Image (tube, helix red, strand yellow):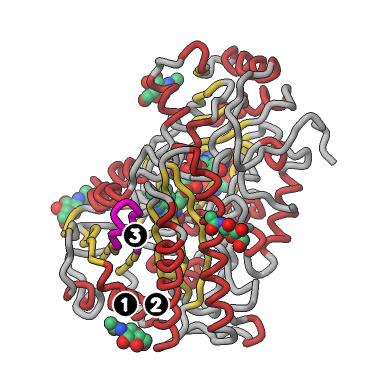
Amino acid sequence: MFANACLVLPVAFPIAAAATISLAAKAACAAIAAEGIETLTSWADWLNEEYITAQSHYWSAANADLIPACVVFPTNAYDVSAVVTALLNEPCVSFAVKSGGHNPNVGYSSVDGGVLISMSNISSTVLSEDQKIAEIGTGSRWLEAAQALEPYNLTVVSGRLGDVGVGGLTLGGGLSFLSTQYGLACDNVVNYEVVLADASIINANATSNPDLFWALKGGGNQFGIVTTFTMKTHPIGKVWGGLRFYSGEYAETILNATHDFNTNFKDPKAALIVTGDITIESLVELFAVFFFYDGETPPPGIFDTFNALPALIDNAKVQTYSELLNGDDNANLYGLRYLIRGTTLPNLPGTTGQSLYNGHYAQWKEYVMTQGVLNPGFIFSIAFQPMPYLIPAQSVAAGGNALGMTPESGDHMWMEYDISWLTSLADDTAHSMSMNITATVEEWAKTNFAGILPSHYKGPTDHAGLENAEYTAIFMNDAMYDQLPLQSYDNNGYARLTAIQRAVDPDGFFSTRTGGFKLGV
Ligand SMILES: Cc1cc2nc3c(=O)[nH]c(=O)nc-3n(C[C@H](O)[C@H](O)[C@H](O)COP(=O)(O)OP(=O)(O)OC[C@H]3O[C@@H](n4cnc5c(N)ncnc54)[C@H](O)[C@@H]3O)c2cc1C
Ligand SMILES: *[C@@H]1O[C@H](CO)[C@@H](O)[C@H](O)[C@H]1NC(C)=O
Ligand SMILES: *[C@@H]1O[C@H](CO)[C@@H](O)[C@H](O)[C@H]1NC(C)=O
Ligand SMILES: *[C@@H]1O[C@H](CO)[C@@H](O)[C@H](O)[C@H]1NC(C)=O
Ligand SMILES: *[C@@H]1O[C@H](CO)[C@@H](O)[C@H](O)[C@H]1NC(C)=O
Ligand SMILES: *[C@@H]1O[C@H](CO)[C@@H](O)[C@H](O)[C@H]1NC(C)=O
């Protein structure tokens, strides 16, 4: 189908480190260097701090096993265009685009033997004169963007941990503490500066390339290389929140309160992430809860149940937004190998919904305590991320995005399951455990709660129910490489995305030469 028959699709996992670098890859690197773009190689620059950071500083250390032919550091869209031109001239060379390096899927922002395009030098935040929008370089981390805007008492709809990258999070949709007020991160983008597969530099916005504009709102990395995101700004002052740890003995109280928070969403300024964690070494079961309120004092009635429980560690306090993002990074450990897997659960009403969450947690815990215990060094976690109908309502009001969620489909919970471990010897086990955990808990939920509609559901009854595959989107930012988030997008989103991908990338530059969640497979 594609002109370059030389390529084997990058395999997501496992990948052995490249022993040799092809002549074609060396030629591509040399051509990029000849354009005056900073180009570093493992054989020449392996002591260079910039090289080491780009090649090895990934949230999941498994990505650092891959050795690129070179790392290139474009500083603007023209440089990125020159990199794409060099790659077009060497059709057998694979590549990867890296922004914050937080995606754990090996081969998405890392590449073995190909060209690694590090966006770390495209990282400025520039506020417009009227202060209504800010241009944010893709290689920026959310902490940097938040710090740059804070002197103006402004912020953007950002990630919830400061260290995560702007590029990957926004292309995957982007869930923020501010989403119940302003939608997903992507809903706040008014312009994408993009380098396309033919090396042209274009703007995608509501009036120029509107199809691509829509596709980039949650459609991922198969459409182009985004250099700058122009985002709406929002006022921000001091906020309340931070991370608290609770003993696992309060699991049921915490999960019931999380259900209540999601069902009876009282205040769009409030947000929560509730994670249960079990460390196999100690078998200690903990809950780490991230609190957020956009204001200094959360009104009574929002976090009362949580506040009444004794916390083991309590970092929740009044602080600036950037301080909060920075503090949340305490949950952001480097040096381990990680997998993340996502599912979406309906938030069922009343005691049924509480039973679903408690039972789901019990199933997960049962798996960890019977299968997980066989693996010393493993850490398992399960996250409950509220997705009340208010968030899709904001998305729709902002013009809609590729995920296609609607407020009529009611309240949901974006579930995230993490495993971390220490060495590549345990990779296969971790991968099969991650799949098995979700298979077990999803099956249980589907069997026991079939046909019950979520709270705030207002859609057609034949489109709902846990047994229904089209129930609602799987969140790409929490998805594992074998999952199909794009295929899960509602309202014909997948077919439309596939058509747009083929139109902007007819020769398969992205679809055959770089990793990521694929369309049309
Ligand atoms: C500790 C932690 C906290 C997280 N918190 C949140 C959260 O609050 N909200 C949320 O929504 N998600 C969150 N995530 C998930 C996160 O959004 C995804 O892992 C995301 O892919 C990371 O983006 P990145 O730029 O850091 O990663 P990278 O690994 O650099 O990139 C991720 C993917 O995007 C592609 N990409 C990156 N930049 C570009 C670009 N400019 N053009 C084209 N393609 C590009 C890469 O090729 C890769 O496929 C979190 C993840 C972690 C590990
Ligand atoms: C890229 O950024 C690094 C680190 O900030 C800096 O040392 C380097 O000079 C930059 N390179 C270019 C070409 O601007
Ligand atoms: C930001 O808010 C603080 C506190 O309200 C105020 O003192 C300061 O003047 C504001 N700064 C700007 C630039 O508006
Ligand atoms: C949309 O793109 C056009 C063409 O590049 C540009 O002139 C216009 O300023 C862009 N609009 C926004 C909102 O950035
Ligand atoms: C949690 O909710 C379930 C189901 O409604 C109920 O049976 C249980 O008593 C509740 N537990 C606590 C601790 O609130
Ligand atoms: C996962 O499930 C499969 C099929 O039931 C089983 O063969 C495999 O051993 C399981 N793996 C783990 C690590 O539990």
Label whose residue precedes the other's in the sequence (1 or 2): 1
Question: Looking at the image, is 330 positioned above or below residue 352?
Answer: above
Alpha carbon separation for disc pair 1 and 2: 6 Å
For the residue pair 472 and 107, the one nearer the viewer reads as 107
Nearer-N-terminus badge (2/3): 3
- Marks 1/2 in contact by CB < 8 Å: the verdict is yes
Q: Locate residue 294 relative to residue 180 in the image: left or right.
A: left
Seen in the picture, residue 356 relative to 293 is either above or below; the reply is: below
Q: Amino acid under label 1?
A: Glu
Residue at mark 3: C-beta within 8 A of ligand 1: no
Say which of 358 and 224 sits in front: 358
Residue 485 in sight from this viewpoint: no
Q: Which residue is mark 1?
A: 252
Horizontally, is 417 left or right of 323 in the view? right
| Location of residue 246 by image quarter | bottom left
What's under tag 2, amino acid-wise? Asn
Residue 375 picture location, percent across and down: 43, 50
Look at mark 3 in the image and give the residue it sits on: 277
Question: For numbered disc 2, what is the local secondary structure?
Answer: helix
Residue found at x 40% / y 45%: 164
**C-alpha span from label 1 to label 3:** 14 Å
Toward which corner of the image does residue 315 lie, by quadrant?
bottom left
Hey, which quadrant is residue 405 in on the image? bottom right
Q: What's drawn in magenta, residue-wise?
A: 276-285
For image coordinates 55% across by 46% down, the residue present is 428
Tell me which residue sits at (28%, 78%) in the image.
253
